[in-house]
Image (tube, grey):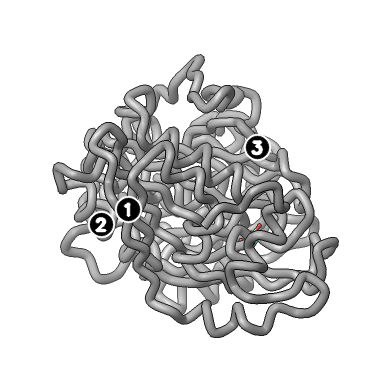
Amino acid sequence: MSLGGKSRAFALAMLVGASLAVPHVSFAQDSSAPATAAATAPNPNLPHVVILCTGGTIAGTGATSTTTVGYTAAKVGCDTLVDSVPELKKVANVTGEQVYQIASESITNDNWLKLSKRINELLKQDNVDGVVVTHGTDTIEETAYFLDLTVKSKKPVVIVGSMRPSTAISADGPINLYNAVIIAGSKEAVGKGVLVCLDDQINAGREVTKSNTSTTDTFRTPDLGFLGYMQDNKPHFYRTSTRLNTADTEFDVSNLTSLPQVDIVYAYGNYNSLALDAFVKAGAKGIVHAGPGDGSVGAQMVGPLQEARKAGVVVVRSARVGSGIIARNGEQPDDKYDWVASDNLNPQKARILLMLALTKTNDTKAIQDMFWKY
Ligand code: SIN
């Protein structure tokens, strides 16, 4: 189907038989469809990229074309998303698959395990050159790091989302998806770990974080900067993450059906151990403390965190400030308390690594090494 000069929003609305002026009730039916878009007449000169759809704003719909907040995420099915960007077929043989359909703030450990296992299955196939994951932006950074640690292949994996719903004027989803497919089919992205690309900027899955509630340039790698640009239908890389990733990590989720419980305790003025105590009582195997400054811990929390450690819970000190390295034995005597420093991982990323670390060992020295390594 040729979309000619029509706007993307209008084109997408056409594809689902909806009008921009009214709520898109027909998308609701679309959301549960087990979509599998088959590439027609594969071009042997193009790479094969599988698009795994998981929901988010890129699959979201608003009541009108000017609705850019207050829309509903995760409504448009994978077939429709892929078909709404016919240019994809000029740069890759694409197939689409709906893995799940959620707003990413509701993501679970089970979702991550399912996604990682599916990507590993696909990338083992000789005829698959790369994978794109469409995803909500709220937790893209967590999924990206989880996959960066658990995908066992050097082939490109690119996670993409959008900040504007598919029905909006100047929706950013189509161009972001187009760029992601090019990167996933490129030689340049091989061996660079899991990547996140929105707004023409390519970031490392380990490093990227969402920095603004609503602007399209929300994704940042604090201090260190992004890896490269998408320009002129090509990825241009200028640096790589120095940390081990994908096939070079020790993590293997292929036989896992669950992950250890790890929770985050957030520090703020006048906080207390209520949340920590509840998490430990509920069976937490690990706690990430999101402290102010250099991962500082309030005097009233030092004792409860020591008790948690004595009870076998692994305690990781991270910081709520958004960038910088936690100095081991700096604000707290980590050696003495047998705590772990999170390096420069923010609390939500530290939680991902701690969950995976606990699938391998309870030894805090080994876990600290993982935090320096990954
Ligand atoms: C979500 O994360 O699913 C909703 C927000 C977004 O995708 O931008």
Q: Dot 3: within a 10 Å radius of its alpha carbon, few (fewer than 14), some, or many (20 or more) residues?
A: many
Mark 3 lies on a secondary structure that is loop
Residue 171 is left or right of residue 51, and the answer is right
Point out which mark residue 5 bears: none
Check contact, mark 2 vs mark 1: CB within 8 A.
Answer: yes
Task: Determine which residue is flagged by label 3.
Answer: 199
Point out which mark residue 356 bears: 1
Q: Amino acid at mark 1?
A: Leu
Task: Determine which residue is flagged by label 2.
Answer: 359
Measured in 3D between alpha carbons, the distance from the residue under mark 2 to the one under mark 3, in whole angstroms, is 35 Å
Residue 262 visible, this angle: yes
Q: Amino acid at mark 2?
A: Thr
Measured in 3D between alpha carbons, the distance from the residue under mark 2 to the one under mark 1, in whole angstroms, is 5 Å
Residue 191 is left or right of residue 22, and the answer is left
In-front residue for pair 242/312: 242
Mark 2 lies on a secondary structure that is loop
Q: Residue at x 31, y 65 (%)?
A: 114
Q: How many marks?
A: 3
Measured in 3D between alpha carbons, the distance from the residue under mark 1 to the one under mark 3, in whole angstroms, is 30 Å
> Where is residue 58, by image quadrant?
bottom right
Residue 179 is left or right of residue 51, and the answer is right
